[in-house]
Structures are given as structure tokens and as C-alpha cells.
Amino acid sequence: MHIEPGVVQGAKIYLSYATGAAALGLAVKAATRHGQTHGVVSLALRSLLAALVVFVCFEVLPHPPVGVSEVHLILGTTIYLLFGLGPAALGLAAGLLLQGLFFAPADLSQYGMNVTTLLAPLFALHLLARRIIPPHTPYVELSYGQVLRLSAAYQGGIVVWVAFWAFYGHGFAAENLAQVASFGVAYLAVILLEPLVDLAVLAAAKALGGLRGSAWVQPRLYEAT
């Protein structure tokens, strides 16, 4: 999880309940739309796969503490491109919840902040993707520049939200500013690394043409709209 216990305390934490509820509401709305379009089975399958990816990113991959939080390779852009907005949103929320329930129960009180931090940038990523990816372009044909912009939007959004919660909880003291800055600088490595992972995954998907039309991945991966 990105926001540790104690960063936001007292009555201030109620804001996280509101933002978390709003983010989860948008996730459910996106998932409902996905289910209506592609079917409940594909929604469940893709959401499960997305949750597994998120859980591995949180618990298996390295996640060193830097500044106000931990640095994770979350692969939000990857699961968005593979599975779609609704499954990606449910996967992020579920993977985060699984981590809290089984590995970090003390962090569950921060779930509202953490789910907001993960989901709000995902919705921003979705809006950006609609602007920069031409309708006739399947995702397996994306360029490095396009994927980099998507990754920068998602990971940059995470940094912005982490900074917001840190400043909201502890103000703008010099020590807090330094910790937020060190966290932001460390995340630059993630912004540079994730597009390479995305391109590798997209190249593998392109090579595995048998996935076309399956319930495992979203149609836009192979087919233009």
C-alpha cells in the first residue's frame, strides 16, 4: 500500500472515506458497463487476472520504502491495455484489499486513501488514452511514445495523490517536503521502466494471436474500434 498508517489521522481521515467511496463507485460503474458489453464471464476472468497481477506487484516484486511511502511497479497501464477499464479498476481495488487482509491488516484503515491513489490516475489514464490513441489503432500496435505518455500519466498521478495525502496529513514542513520529493524522484525509475514492460507484454500478445477474441483479454487489444 502507498499511504502508511499515521500519515493522515483524526477527523482528516474522513476525506479518504469520501474519495475512496467515489473511486469505488466509478470502478463499479465501469465494470458494469464492461459486463454489459462483453459479458459477465469475461468481466470476472479479466478482473481476477488483473487482481493477481496487482497482488504480485505489491507482494512479490521489490517495493523499497522511499520518503513518505513505498515505490511499487504497479503495472496499471499494462492491466488497462490488456483487460480494459472496468476489470483494471476492479483488479486494482481487489488486489489492494487482498494485500491488506492477508499481509498488512494494520493498513486497512488507509484503504480509502490507497484505493483513491490507485484508481483516480487510472480514470485519468483512460481519458488520455481516448485522446492520444487513434480509433483505428489496436493496442498491440502502440508506439513507445504513446505507451510512455500513458505510463507517465498513471504513475505521475500516483505521485500527485501520495503527495496530496502527505501534505494534507502533515503540512509543508521541510522534512515532509524532502520526503515527498525523494519519493517523487524515486518514481521516475518506474515511469521509465513500465513502458518497456508494457511494450514487451504487447509484443507477446501480438505474437500470441490465439488470444484474439478470447475472454482473457479485451477486444481492443487486437481490433480497432
Image: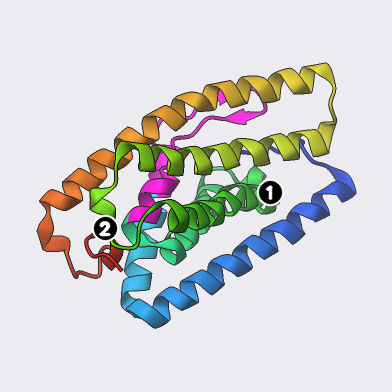
Say which residue appears at 65% left-offset and 44% top-offset.
Answer: 107
Residue 52 in sight here = no
- The front one of 105 and 128 is 128
Instruction: Please report whichever mark, 2 or 1, sits nearer to the chain's N-terminal start.
Output: 1
Which numbered disc covers residue 171? none
Residue type marked 2: Pro
Q: Label 1: few (<14), some or many (≥20) within 10 Å?
A: many
User: In this figure, which residue is indicated by the disc labeled 1?
Assistant: 113
Which numbered disc covers residue 138? 2
What number of labels is visible? 2
Q: Where is residue 215 in the image (x, y as percent from the top left)?
A: 25, 70
- The front one of 19 and 221 is 221
Q: In this view, does 122 lie to the left or right of 110?
A: left
Dot 1 falls on a residue whose secondary structure is helix
Pick the quarter of the image with the C terminus: bottom left
Residue extent of the magenta highlight: 54-81
Dot 2 falls on a residue whose secondary structure is loop
Please determine whether, in this image, residue 91 is positioned above or below residue 72.
below
Is 194 one of the magenta-colored residues? no
